[in-house]
Amino acid sequence: MRIELATEPGSPERPNEDWASAVAPAAGQGGTLVLLDGVTPPRGGDGCVHSVSWFTSRLGGALAELSASRRDLTLADILALSIRRTADTHRSLCDLSHVRTPQATVVLARWDDVRIEHLVLSDSVLLLEAPDGTVEPVLDDRLDRLPPGSLTSEEAVDTHLRNKEGGFFTAGADPSVVSRAVTGEHLRTEVRALAALTDGASRWTEKFREGDWAGTLGMLRKVGPQGLIDRVRELERADTGRVFLRRGKTHDDATAALVEF
């Protein structure tokens, strides 16, 4: 089995709010992959005294531990329990009902000798490659389905879209959000590789259109996760006319993971 991870902040002046971990237990018990993309709040109060990176490290740590140790629970159960456990660590200090309390997108994958389970919440990406090379993207595409112009102001997002019906959902302090996640499973024999990317790394396909999802996985196999991130950075620096980036950040935190069985 080959497992590779790489992550890079969008700016050296800001902490990296992505978080990733891969666990491959011994004795044939299988393994897990966790990938989070912290949601950066706008300037101003967010109801919490902790940083987004503080939140992602604690939520990610809970997800990694429970995914490996509680194989009797579904991934949705594990996400709900991890959200609750993380919220309990700062509930007495912070207003967790605030719409901008720290949040994150989530990708979870767990495998053993028989099956591979997956969960995706919000706009990070999971790719599953079949033995014949076909690549299936697992996407929570709610953000892509929003009406054009609906994300133009933070006030509109907070009032009408963030963790609301008809909008999009991320993991914050409310465990009920797990009902919005995209979940499923495959037989282990149906998957020869999987990959997970935060939206800073998936730009290679989603913004710059350098290749389809099969091309993304091929790039990961050829140059590794760091190589893919390096290519994204080159494309970002070259887009001086904002043809592809438009209103988006020039550089975003970028994380990619590849698992080959």
Image: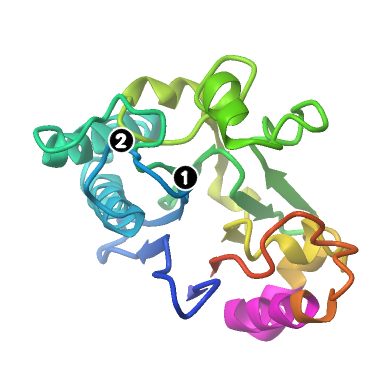
**Is residue 136 magenta-colored?**
no
Residue at mark 2 to residue at mark 1: CA–CA distance: 12 Å
Residue 224 location in percent, x, y? Answer: 62, 81
Asked which secondary structure carries label 1, the reply is strand
Q: Main secondary structure of the magenta part?
A: helix
Residue 195 location in percent, x, y? Answer: 60, 61
Residue position marked by numbered label 2 in the rendering = 78
Kindly identify the amino acid type of the residue bearing the numbered disc 1. Answer: Val
Residue position marked by numbered label 1 in the rendering = 106
What residue is shown at x 71% (from left), y 47% (from top)? 137
Residue 199 location in percent, x, y? Answer: 63, 56
**Is residue 222 magenta-colored?**
yes
State the extent of the magenta-drawn residues as a range: 219-235
What residue is shown at x 80% (from left), y 26% (from top)? 147
Residue 79 location in percent, x, y? Answer: 34, 35
Asked which secondary structure carries label 2, the reply is helix
Tally of numbered tags: 2
